[in-house]
Image (cartoon, grey):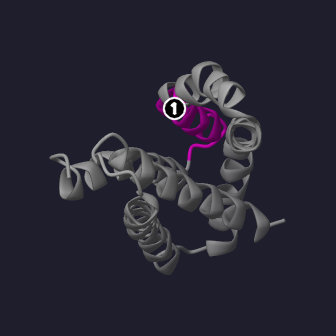
Amino acid sequence: MTVLVPLVLGTLALVDAALAGFRAATGRNARIRKRSYYLAASRRGLASGAAGLGLVALLIVTAFAGSADPGARYAGLVGAGTRMLQVLAPFAAVVVVSLLAYWLLPMRGSTFVILIGLGPFTLARPVVVIAAVGWSVAASSDWLVWAAALAAAVSVLAVEPVVHRRWYRSPA
């Protein structure tokens, strides 16, 4: 369990980063065949998200290096991560179901899924991330838990604006 929580959180963050890269590029290209364009955008988002996660990992490793009891600190981080997953996992599950419905349903059903699911979920994403951070740090007084949770939230929420400003400021 102590390895599973960071792996699941990291996977969620990286998938979210790839989708954020895709979102940053949407509506910026009038070409008909956009598959390679969207794949490049997703890769850019993934790379930006990985860089952000690397900075969070660097913060945690640096704090562990100067800690008298790294095991206790790691346990505190895993506990906070578990609480974070209690908020993020249901949201991610609903998004995955919506994406599957979007890909599998006919055109009319896919449009409906976008209107009632994917659009509002995209708008709710920052609120869910902030709620997950709040819930994860509520039971901890360790500064590392607070710093790692806030750094992870900033990292996740910054991917789309960074990718958008860097590569998709103007239409192609």
Total labels drawn: 1
Outermost residue toward the left in this view: 170
- Residue at image x 64%, y 63%? 11
In magenta, the rendered stretch is 124-141
Report the residue at 35% width, 47% height from top. Answer: 24
Neighbour tally class for label 1: few under 14, some 14-19, many 20 plus, Cα within 10 Å: some
In the image, what residue type sits under mark 1?
A: Thr
* Image vertical order of residue 168 relative to residue 138, above or below: below
Image quarter where the N terminus lies is bottom right
The structure residue drawn at horizontal position 54% and vertical position 37%, both measured from the top left corner, is 129
Percent of width and height locating residue 155: 40, 53
Single out the residue that lies furthest toward the front: 32
Q: Position of residue 19 (x, y in %)?
A: 51, 51
Residue toward you, 95 or 99? 99
Camera-side residue: 90 or 1?
Answer: 90
Q: Mark 1 = which residue?
A: 122
Q: Is residue 126 magenta?
A: yes
Frontmost residue, 100 versus 165: 100
Secondary element type, mark 1? helix
User: 77 left or right of 62?
Assistant: right
Residue lying at the far right in this picture: please name it. 1
Q: Quadrant of residue 112?
A: top right
Relative to the observer, which residue lies in front, 145 or 5?
5
Is 58 drawn above or below residue 121 in the view shown?
Answer: below
106 sits left or right of 143 in the view: right
Q: Tell me which residue sits at (66%, 49%) in the image.
A: 80
Magenta portion: prevailing SS class: helix
Residue 145 rendering spot, x and y as whole percentages: 55, 52
Q: Is residue 160 magenta?
A: no
Horizontally, residue 166 falls left or right of residue 30, namely: left
Q: Judge from the rendering whether residue 160 lies leftward or rightward of residue 108; answer left or right.
A: left
